[in-house]
Amino acid sequence: MAIKDSHTTSKSTQSGLNLFEKMQVRLGVAQILILTFTLIAAVYIGFQQNSINQKLYDLNFNVSLEVTYDNKQLNIINKGKENVWIWGTKLADNPKNIERDSRLIPPGGFYYMLATRLELDLIKNIGINGEIRLPLEVYIESANQRRYVVKLLLWAIIKDGVLAVHTQTLAIQPFNWEKQK
């Protein structure tokens, strides 16, 4: 059995690695940590970018409607970039009326609803002079098949027997109304 001289044995041979090998291990661990951090950051950025892209895509489907009253009819004008479909309405305390089939309004187009009966009811209830404000809801569906309710206020004014109806859009809100079968 040979006895080693403690003066001839270096520290690097006692640990099994020389200085260069220790540096390589440290660099390898640093590379693994950097790659792990980079992977986590890339995944996070990817999810954030996907969320941003979805929001930008959804901007195309923003619903923008204008409702006007003219010549005994309510005009519903699509000011958005995509088609919308009207499914029904609800005036004041009346039950909502959801149709079996929708009515398409292309971008820049309009749909009108005859309001002759509404005018007769307003004149009957208000008289020769007076005013009334009635809530109106319009049930629509966007091109990406999301459902909304457009909440409006109809302000009817009769002065000396002459009727004027003003419209004001209060909100366009997501709302899951049911279609009739």
Image (tube, helix red, strand yellow):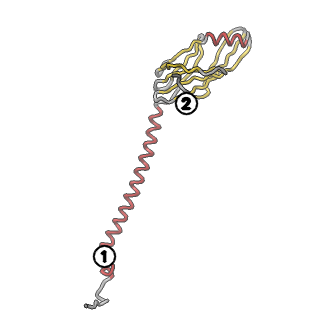
Residue 39 bears which disc, if any?
A: none
* Count of numbered badges drawn on the protein: 2
Rendered location of residue 113, percent (x, y): 56, 14
Rendered location of residue 71, percent (x, y): 59, 10
Query: Could you tell me which residue is drawn at 54 percent across and 26 percent down?
Result: 178
Whether residue 127 sits left or right of residue 17 in the image: it is: right
Earlier-in-chain disc, 2 versus 1: 1
Query: Does 114 appear above or below 144?
Result: above
Q: Amino acid at mark 2?
A: Asn
Whether residue 173 sits left or right of residue 46 in the image: it is: right
**In which image quadrant can residue 49 be found?**
top left
**In which image quadrant can residue 57 be found?**
top left
Q: Residues within 10 Å of mark 2 (few under 14, many from 20)?
A: few
Mark 2 and mark 1: Cα distance apart in space: 69 Å
Quadrant in which the N terminus appears? bottom left
Element assignment for label 1? loop
Rendered location of residue 88, percent (x, y): 56, 21
Asked whether the beta carbons under mark 2 and mark 1 sit within 8 Å of each other, the answer is no
Query: Could you tell me which residue is drawn at 33 percent across and 71 percent down?
Result: 23
Q: Amino acid at mark 1?
A: Leu
Element assignment for label 2? loop
Residue 17 bears which disc, if any?
A: 1
Query: Does 143 appear above or below 7?
Result: above
Q: In the rendered image, which residue does mark 2 sit on?
A: 176
Q: Residues within 10 Å of mark 1 (few under 14, many from 20)?
A: few
Whether residue 18 sits left or right of residue 168 in the image: it is: left
- Disc number lying in front (2 or 1): 2
Seen as rendered, the residue at the extreme top is: 161
